[in-house]
Amino acid sequence: MGSSGWNGPGRRLRASLILCGLLTLQGVWSVADAQEPGETPSEGRLLVLNKGENSLMVLDVPSYRRLATIPVGKEPHEVVATPDGRKAYVSNVRDKTVSVVDLAALRVARTLRSDRFDTPHGLAMTPDGRSLLLTSEGSRRFFLIDAARDVVMRSVTTTQARPHMVVVLEGGKKAYAANVDSGSVTLLGLPDLRILKNVPVGDGPEGIAATANGKWVLAALQRTDQVAILDAGSGAVLARLPTARRPSGWPSLRTPSPPS
């Protein structure tokens, strides 16, 4: 979660917020990435969004040399990559689009648009890389996008206000979304994109993440300075722990295998 140790839940959460909005990748390689003699071997890529400049930076890890700055849509908020590291998706809040970025060519390959994209925000890939889940705050909708063809397969409307961040569990059959203004999280069934239940968790849930073992889901409650811990199977709230002030997000971390 971006922290070197616990030392109390508040400290760990503060450390994780520093990395929020970044995406680390392993396995985005090309011939141009060959190392000069004496250079530290590349371990992957770091993707960083610049909201004010409407761009996506691609940096090498561990040198953090900038490989490209790619123009995307207006006010990009979130970025997620396919498990094979070939593509990234960026949600652009201001112009209501999603940019599809070719990480080998380092350019926007396609821009997804829909008249129902209104404040598109949270993004999450299924583990098999076949589908992308997108939240739309303004239209109160969830979208499931075919990541091979980059087209919207289906969408569903929610009664909850401001569906914001979303996480897909490792099995790829369930997803959880945080609804900021309803004080709830939504449990979704995949791939049919069904709303299974809405669970009250506390005031202002924003960031949401799942543990590596898939047993628990954590939601950052920014208006109560807490983190809610849920049973990933049932959605039941198991505990609420205190944090530092206004917790708002979690880092987006993926480690895909190198493409063949």
Image (spheres, grey):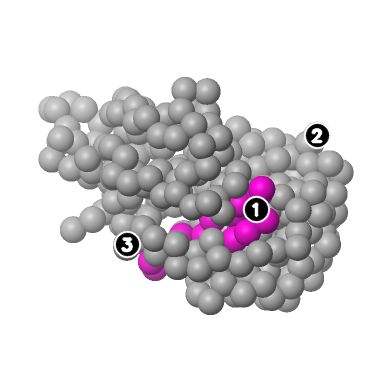
Please tell me whether mark 3 or mark 2 is closer to you in this view.
3
Please tell me whether mark 3 or mark 1 is closer to you in this view.
1
Label 3 secondary element? loop
Against 124, residue 186 (above or below) is: below
How many numbered callouts?
3
Label 1 secondary element? loop
N-terminal of the pair, mark 3 or mark 1, is: 1
Inter-mark Cα distance, 3 to 2 = 42 Å
Question: What segment carries the magenta color?
Answer: 128-142
Compared across the picture, whether 233 is left or right of 108 comes to right
Query: Could you say which is closer to the camera, residue 249 or residue 214?
Result: 249
Inter-mark Cα distance, 1 to 2 = 29 Å
Q: Are marks 1 and 2 in contact (CB under 8 Å)?
A: no
Compared across the picture, whether 237 is left or right of 143 comes to right
Looking at the rendering, in which quadrant would you find the C terminus?
A: bottom left
Query: Could you say which is closer to the camera, residue 39 or residue 89?
Result: 89
Residue 116 seen in the current view = yes
Count neighbours of disc 1 (C-alpha within 10 A) and say few if under 14, some if 14 to 19, many if 20 or more: some
Residue 171 seen in the current view = no
Q: Quadrant of residue 151?
A: bottom left
User: Label 1 belongs to which residue?
Assistant: 139
Q: Are marks 3 and 1 in contact (CB under 8 Å)?
A: no
Against 222, residue 166 (above or below) is: below
Question: For the residue marked with disc 2, what is the amino acid?
Answer: Arg
Q: Which residue shows up at 27% across the image and 37% down it?
A: 106
